[in-house]
Image (spheres, rainbow, N blue to C red):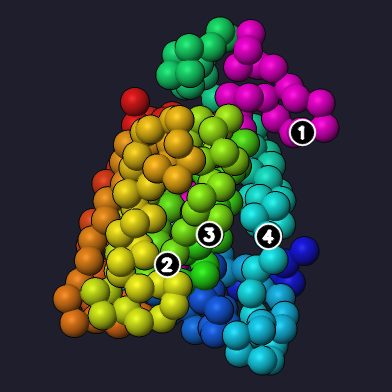
C-alpha cells in the first residue's frame, strides 16, 4: 500500500473536496508545492499527497519513488470515498432530490440507486456522489497514474489534472476502460512544448490526447475512450516543469469544476 500521506487542510468545511497530488518519478511529496501556489483560491479543498514507494528503476539504475499500480491507488480512493459517505450521513445524507438527480443521469431507478454492492460501503447513489468530490493529478508519472486510475475506476471521479504527463498502456487502455462509464470525466492536460523528458515529449502527449478523445470503438490503436471534456493546453518554450501561466489555467479549470460540484454530477 502507499506509505501514508501528507495532507494540507485549508478549510473546516464539513464535506470538503479532496485533490490528490501524485508526485513525479524523481520527486517526493514535499516537492509538490502546487497546493501552495493555487490552494488559497480553493478554501473547501483538501490537498492530499500520497507518498510513493522507493523502487529500483532500470533507466536510472537506482531507487526512485514510484507508484506501483492503479489498483493500489484505487484502494486509497475507495477508503476516502467511504469516509466522505460517513460525513454525508452525519449531515443527514442525500436529499431525495439529489438522489433522484443521480439516478436520472444514469437512467437508473430509485431502487437501483439505493442498492448496496456486497463487500462495499454505501449505496450506489452515495458512492457516486462521493467519488465526484475526489480529484486526481498532477505531474509526470503522477499524471500518468491519475489518468490510468480514473479511467479504470469503477465509479467516475470528479476530475483529473495532468501536467507534463503521459498515458500509460496507451494501446491497451481502451480495452480496460471500455466497460467503464468515464466519458464525462473532466480532464485538464497542460504540457510544455519543449519537454524532452521521455516519455513526456509533447508529440507523445498530443497522440495520447487524440486517443483519449477518439470515439472509434473498433480499432484499439485508434482509441475508443471517447472523452467529452478534455482540455489540452500546450506552452511554448517550457520544458518538463510547471509554471505560473499553466497554474493559472489549471486554477480556472478547477474553479469551473468546483462550481459545478454544487450539483450531484458535474456534466450531463
Query: Label 2: which residue?
Result: 165
Task: Locate residue 82 relative to residue 254 in the image: left or right.
Answer: right
SS for tag 1?
A: loop
Dividing the picture into quadrants, the one containing residue 69 is: bottom right
Q: Which is nearer the eye, 115 or 229?
A: 229
- Name the mark on residue 120: 1
Q: Residue at x 40, y 62 (%)?
A: 162
Mark 1 or mark 2, earlier in chain:
1
Mark 4 or mark 2: whose residue is earlier in sequence: 4
Q: Nearer the viewer, mark 1 or mark 2?
A: 2
Q: Is residue 119 visible?
A: yes
Q: Nearer the viewer, residue 102 or 242?
A: 242
Q: In terms of secondary structure, where does tag 2 sit?
A: loop
For label 3, the residue is 168
Where does residue 89 sit, x and y in percent of width and height? 64, 32
Range of magenta residues: 111-139
Above or below, 206 against 115 in this view is: below
- Left or right for 79, reference 13: right
Residue 108 against residue 147 in the figure, above or below: above
Is disc 4 placed on a helix, strand or loop?
A: loop
Q: Can I make out residue 227 in this image? A: no
Q: Are marks 3 and 4 in contact (CB under 8 Å)?
A: no
Amino acid at each position: 500500500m502507499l506509505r501514508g500521506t501528507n495532507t494540507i487542510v485549508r478549510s473546516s468545511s464539513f464535506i470538503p473536496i479532496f485533490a490528490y497530488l501524485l508526485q513525479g518519478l524523481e520527486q517526493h511529496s514535499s516537492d509538490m508545492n502546487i497546493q501552495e501556489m493555487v490552494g488559497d483560491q480553493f478554501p473547501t479543498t483538501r490537498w492530499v499527497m500520497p507518498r510513493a514507494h522507493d523502487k529500483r528503476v532500470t533507466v536510472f539504475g537506482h531507487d526512485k519513488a514510484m507508484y506501483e499500480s492503479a489498483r493500489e491507488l484505487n484502494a486509497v480512493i475507495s477508503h476516502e470515498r467511504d469516509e466522505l459517505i460517513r460525513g454525508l450521513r452525519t449531515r443527514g445524507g442525500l436529499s431525495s432530490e439529489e438522489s433522484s438527480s443521480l439516478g436520472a443521469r444514469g437512467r437508473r431507478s430509485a431502487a437501483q440507486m439505493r442498492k448496496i454492492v456486497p463487500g462495499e460501503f454505501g449505496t450506489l447513489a452515495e458512492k457516486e456522489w462521493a467519488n465526484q468530490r475526489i480529484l486526481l493529478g498532477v505531474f509526470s508519472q503522477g499524471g500518468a497514474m491519475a489518468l490510468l486510475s480514473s479511467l479504470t475506476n469503477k465509479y467516475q471521479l470528479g476530475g483529473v489534472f495532468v501536467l507534463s504527463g503521459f498515458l500509460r498502456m496507451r494501446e491497451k487502455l481502451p480495452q480496460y476502460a471500455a466497460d467503464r462509464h468515464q466519458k464525462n470525466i473532466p480532464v485538464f492536460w497542460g504540457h510544455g512544448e519543449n519537454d524532452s523528458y521521455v516519455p513526456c515529449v509533447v508529440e507523445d502527449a498530443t497522440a495520447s490526447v487524440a486517443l483519449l478523445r477518439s470515439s472509434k470503438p473498433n480499432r484499439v490503436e485508434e482509441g475508443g475512450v471517447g472523452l467529452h471534456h478534455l482540455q489540452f493546453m500546450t506552452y511554448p518554450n517550457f520544458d518538463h516543469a510547471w509554471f505560473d501561466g499553466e497554474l493559472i489555467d489549471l486554477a480556472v479549470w478547477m474553479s469551473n469544476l468546483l462550481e459545478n460540484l454544487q450539483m450531484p454530477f458535474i456534466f450531463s
